[in-house]
Image (cartoon, helix red, strand yellow):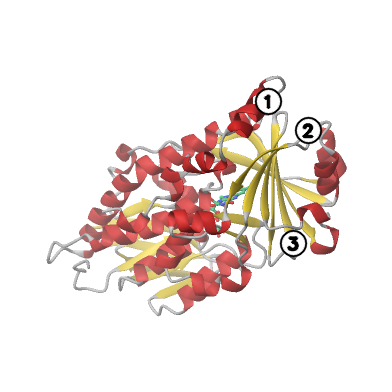
Amino acid sequence: MAILPDKNPHCLIVGAGIAGLATAISLAQRNIRVTIVEKRDNFLEEGAGIQLGPNATRCLSQLGVTTYLRENIIAPNSLILSNLKSGDIVNKLPLGRVIRDKFSSPYWLIKRKHLHLALLEQAKTLNLISLNMSCRLIDYQEHSNGYAVLCGNNQKQQDEFSVHAIIGADGVYSDFRAKTLPRKKPRFSGFIAWRGTIEKRDIPKAFQKRQVQLAFGNGCHFVGYPVQSGELYNCVLVTKNRLKNYQQEGMISSDQLLDKIGRIAPNFKSLISCCPKWTGWPLYAHLNLSLKDFEAFNAQTLIGDAAHPVLPFLAQGAALSLEDAVVLGASIDQQNEEDLPAKAFFTSAFRSYEQKRLARWKQVAKAAKNNHIPYHLYWPFSEVRDLILSLQPSYNLLKKYDWLYGFKAEEEA
Ligand SMILES: Cc1cc2nc3c(=O)[nH]c(=O)nc-3n(C[C@H](O)[C@H](O)[C@H](O)COP(=O)(O)OP(=O)(O)OC[C@H]3O[C@@H](n4cnc5c(N)ncnc54)[C@H](O)[C@@H]3O)c2cc1C
């Protein structure tokens, strides 16, 4: 356990998304007081589904969050790899018990909102966390003992207080990162993720199983899986967009989406047609932070998408955020210098956290980015991909993910 500075250490977290809440829990579990500011006024709807691989579920267990998730998770039996155009299944990877036994932690599917609510439930049990909704970090001044921060939502409701450290957890378009590293901006990847959900009564029978579908198309791919005890089916279709800079999120119908991707197999066409509205999310990534970027940070750092926006082609953005929370906790535990002032204590813990995380962020970002190549191949290369995939024993395919799912954030010391 860490030797904490004698005066109550106090940390500000900007953003109460998955990264912010998970890290608040991790710090409060180590007797650190945390104030979170969140610009939104509610957490009513939170996108659609999220896949949590064993590396993520292991972190949730470390953070004591799993008890609040149980009712809302689905443990899928398999991942079905298909060709979107022909509908042919090219391989089937076992998930369920196989993956749980292999990595000592399960693979879960969940609604984003339920993951978020579970993190909030656990945060509420920890007295050291205070969450301020409709509140932003307006300004801050660094001083020798920490930071004087000004937070609030308008001219009238502003609050000034002092903290020893600040963590930016305000997502891919982070204001905090823009203030601290103005030259580091994520770039548009050229991909749009179209997201939608299908109500249980409309889900075609063939897709009512506990399976994750990954279907490779021509210049696109589809991911689908059930969430919320099978009450909803979560769909994501990723397409390429030629625009260099795409910032508008738009909503389109299934017919408009089908027009964009050309001819596909009847089973996938009817599935996509069952989802009436699709919301477009331009995918931003490629931030490429280096340790040098953090050198002048003192007791400030970045976590979650604010630090490492990754393409969702490995389903790992939230997982990395959960890993950040656990590794930051482990870095706090390692601080054993006596009589260290709180600001110096956090400065040392944060540099150690960044050192431990950077290689992992880069490895996951690269693997996720590279996935678009096999996923989006055109004929005849798509035939070669399907043949290679179909010839491999599924266990061998799963083995390729050992480095990803076998990662133990709590052991990063
Ligand atoms: C199509 C798609 C599918 C995905 N699927 C998966 C998946 O299956 N598995 C997975 O692990 N990941 C997945 N991800 C990635 C995952 O959703 C993100 O990586 C994750 O949500 C990042 O969490 P975060 O807390 O860093 O950021 P966010 O969730 O964006 O949270 C940031 C928070 O900060 C708040 N905020 C912003 N600015 C301010 C400010 N100035 N002041 C105060 N508060 C502020 C926001 O309101 C928000 O609450 C997917 C992403 C996409 C786009």
Is residue 378 positioned above or below 206 on the image?
A: above
Rendered position, 242 above or below 126: above
Element marked by disc 2:
loop
Q: Residue at x 41, y 62 (%)?
A: 23
Q: Quadrant of residue 39?
A: bottom right
Quarter occupied by the C terminus = bottom left
Task: For marks 2 and 3, give the one nearer the viewer.
Answer: 2
For disc 1, the neighbor class at 10 Å (few under 14, some 14 to 19, many from 20) is some
* Residue 232: image tag: 3
- How far from the left and from the top, in percent, is residue 240? 68, 31
Q: Look at the numbered disc 3 and give the secondary structure of its residue.
A: strand
Which residue is nearer to you in this view: 297 or 368?
Answer: 368
Of mark 1 and mark 3, the one earlier in the sequence is 3
Q: Which residue is mark 1?
A: 382
Q: Please say if the residues under marks 1 and 2 sit with CB atoms less than 8 Å apart.
A: yes
- Of residues 202 and 142, the one drawn nearer to the viewer in this rendering: 202
Q: Mark 2 Cα within 10 Å, few/some/many (few <14, many 20+)?
A: some
- In the displayed structure, does residue 263 sit left or right of residue 174? right
Amino acid residing under circle 3: Leu
10 or 352, nearer to the observer: 352
Q: Are marks 2 and 3 in contact (CB under 8 Å)?
A: no
- Image quarter where the N terminus lies is bottom left
Separation (CA) of disc 1 from disc 3: 31 Å
Foreground of the two, 217 or 158: 217
Residue type indicated by callout 1: Ser
Residue 194 placement (x, y as % from top left): 72, 44
Q: Position of residue 201 (x, y in %)?
A: 84, 63
Horizontal side of residue 368 vs 412, given as left or right: right
Q: What distance separates the C-alpha of mark 2 from that of mark 3?
A: 24 Å
